[in-house]
Amino acid sequence: MELAQESRRASLALQSATAAHKSAALLRIHDLLAERKDRILEANRQDLEIARKELEAGRITNALYKRLDLSVGDKYASLLQGVLDVDKLDDPTGQVSLARRLDTGLDLYKVSCPVGVLLIIFESRPEVVVQISCLALKSSNAVILKGGKEATHSNQALFEVIQEALASLAPDVQENIPPASVQLVTSRDEIASLLSLDAYIDLVIPRGSKQLVQYVQGATRIPVLGHADGICSVYIDASADVAKALSVVVDSKCTYPAACNSVETLLLHVDVLPMLPKIASALGRNGVQLRMDPQSLASTGTADVATMPSSPADYDTEFLELVLAVKTVRSLEEAIAHVNEHGSHHTDCIVTESSENADMYMRKVDAAGVYWNASTRFADGFRYGFGAEIGVSTNKTHARGPVGLEGLVIYKYRLYGSGSATADYGEGKKAYKHEPIALDSAPHSFRR
Amino acid sequence: MELAQESRRASLALQSATAAHKSAALLRIHDLLAERKDRILEANRQDLEIARKELEAGRITNALYKRLDLSVGDKYASLLQGVLDVDKLDDPTGQVSLARRLDTGLDLYKVSCPVGVLLIIFESRPEVVVQISCLALKSSNAVILKGGKEATHSNQALFEVIQEALASLAPDVQENIPPASVQLVTSRDEIASLLSLDAYIDLVIPRGSKQLVQYVQGATRIPVLGHADGICSVYIDASADVAKALSVVVDSKCTYPAACNSVETLLLHVDVLPMLPKIASALGRNGVQLRMDPQSLASTGTADVATMPSSPADYDTEFLELVLAVKTVRSLEEAIAHVNEHGSHHTDCIVTESSENADMYMRKVDAAGVYWNASTRFADGFRYGFGAEIGVSTNKTHARGPVGLEGLVIYKYRLYGSGSATADYGEGKKAYKHEPIALDSAPHSFRR
């Protein structure tokens, strides 16, 4: 509660942080993280030691253990480079999206500004502390970080370095970016109480398992940005090109099956069942197991691939492994209806040579990403060219799909009058002009 | 539940409604509402008869009674004109806000599309049935209307005409705008169950009292667009021009005190207390009562105005009548701190001749509208030139301030590939181009 109030105060100070202030903070964080690398990896080793026992006892997976390890390969170098990359991004605040002369001496501007206070709840990956702190600062938001207990030492060490960096900034920078701009919460039972603080926290971003996201979505009135499920689909239309189908299906399923943008359901038009053996063989070579409806199963022929009959639940399941549900449909409409009913509105693809069918599919499928002849795995902020990714959202408001820094800003209306009164307008009085004016015609520069 | 599922199905059909389909529907609604005027006013009279007894028994206010009456002045003509006005607005769907070549043969478009299913909960004003139905259709959303019991007959009559209009459209239009696009719920106890249907309803818009809005905000996981409080403020800075101060304060308080954008708190820099008698007199002439801190009270002099000492609660109160809380501050910073602490983030104004102070105020005050020398009552979709207003939002995500049709759309990403696979990109392989391309370079026209 008090912590959230501090974040709120910090967020008000951040409203006047300039691009130069923010850059100074990010570069200082980068330099100090480089300097303190040994200390951080030492803390990380403490987490890894505990995790190794959990791993040996079979209580955690090897994947989780690996996610925890900051010393693996170039992970620490990437973490440092990530800070510099965020620094180079365009400032998302102070951008004017509307400038309108309501009347002479009465000009309106719609200007992007930070959302306010963010709460990030995350699991295992300690580098999230750095990534999200930098994205929050870049967008002039205060952030409260709540990490998982498996990364307690690593999170704490990274947080302390960020605190030290912010506390060492010049006084004029600190005035606008106080150390309380980034806060860390460690104890496990504080989540529920944080989620009740809708008076102080403006946006919650859960990063982690489906269970975590669903818990957060159900437990708070604060807007939640994220996605619980990633049940993506690829539909092979009657007029599909077999080479494109092969390329899209294999890439969508096999490049990283644990990712939310991997395909989980393959729909095939009945007319293209003859291309199934070829697709099934390619998937088989990649170790994929197929769960098939009777018609597609019968059409698989002698393809060298593990198959089994599908159950209805398979079409509502995010497998997150090398398993793919396969279903035959009789029409484009049936495919669209299936996706809208069973998908999770994340990313869905049609493979077809028909421009008309592609357009109908892309129009009617209600998903954050609708693709034509492209792997579902392109659903990613970096691949979209956003330079950063806050997360992927299946929300229907605010931000949808891969979300870059624009998901951390909202806007305010600035109105510049001259003693202007509404009573002067109306029938028999002055009329509004509502003329577009140059985005930069305000007496104040919004970007600093 | 079944009703909400029907709305969901209608919303999927609406995804392919063209501008021409939507125009046909709106014009048909307009014509039939004109034709059925007598029947609707007859139904309205039934509501008015019941309401008159409530009024006489002192159970409802005269203001509520008047809001219910569709036959007053040119209200019905305005209602009809409103339908034509919505028809003339630009289609908010199919607008491209980003077009980017990720690589040769891999083009990305961010295209606006409807949110999906809207739930509107409103009180007394039956014309909301028509306004919101038209705005929903214009933005290709399905809508569930839940009106108050005091307008049962009027709402039902208006709804029936809209149903009749939709059911009489040509088959190709009906295919994309089925009659279930607009649905009406009448019984009182259905609100709670509707608010639990987050699987089918994408956005709730409560239009009515603060109590209604707060109840809705607390009772649902569905995103809510609206505002509970309108505690707007005007701050008279040390360097204010007295004529501008007078004009802004009187207009902000007196033109329509029951509106959410009316001022409730007047802050005065201690240096401008000498201009208070003049402002107080002008407010007094308009029947305003002032609730004042000791210093401002002492500075009011012989001004002919009703005054009383303020209590702390007055600075957190939306009076919605001719009452104004007045407080002296010692600095711009104190004014900003007061507004951020006690305001409702709706609309706040500074009166000053100092461009620097104006900029600091507008930057640091965290509100949907920050005004310089302009009445808070300009916070209105029509005055902003939006052509329509869904409501005013004090949310920090999705839409803020007066919300036009853009608050009823979100976007989807359309990706046009050529069998494209992510595995072809990365170190030693292809690189992303991320080049801007023309917004209209897609093989499909998004605006139809």
Image: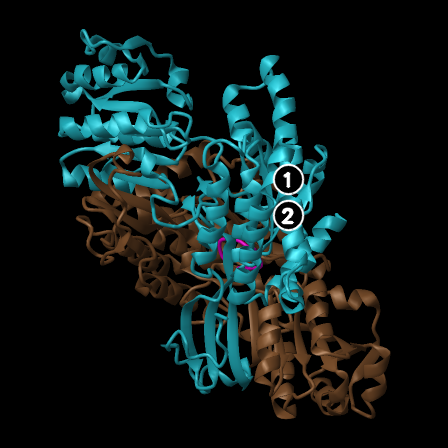
Chain colours: A cyan, B brown
Q: In the image, what residue type sits under mark 1?
A: Arg
Disc 1: CA contacts within 10 A as few (<14), some (14-19) or many (>=20): some
Q: Residue at x 47, y 40 (%)?
A: B201
Please determine if labels 2 and 1 lie on a single subunit: yes
Judging depth in this view, the residue of B233 and A49 nearest the camera is A49
Judging depth in this view, the residue of A314 and B332 nearest the camera is B332
**Residue identifier under label 2:** A161
Q: In the image, what residue type sits under mark 2?
A: Val
Disc nearer the start of the sequence (2/1): 1
Residue B375 lies in the magenta stretch: no
Judging depth in this view, the residue of A121 and B129 nearest the camera is A121
- Left or right: residue B251 compared with residue A349: right
Q: Mark 2 and 1 residues: CB-CB less than 8 Å, in contact?
A: yes
Instruction: Using the image, tell me which numbered label, if any, was put on residue A39.
Output: 1
Residue A160: give x, y in percent of width and height.
Answer: 67, 46
Q: Residue at x 62, y 80 (%)?
A: B357
Q: State the predominant SS element of the stretch in magenta.
A: loop
Disc 2 is placed on an element classified as: helix
Residue A245: give x, y in percent of width and height.
Answer: 20, 28
The answer to whether residue A5 is seen in the rendering is: yes
The answer to whether residue B145 is seen in the rendering is: no
Which of the chains bears the disc numbered 2?
Answer: A
Disc 1 is placed on an element classified as: helix
Instruction: Using the image, tell me which numbered label, if any, was put on residue A219.
Output: none
Disc 2: CA contacts within 10 A as few (<14), some (14-19) or many (>=20): many
- Left or right: residue A322 compared with residue A145: left
What is the magenta range?
B392-399
Q: Residue at x 38, y 30 (%)?
A: A343
How far is mark 2 from mark 1, CA to CA?
Answer: 10 Å
Residue B7: give x, y in percent of width and height.
Answer: 41, 39
Residue B400: give x, y in percent of width and height.
Answer: 52, 60
Q: Nearer the viewer, mark 2 or mark 1?
A: 1
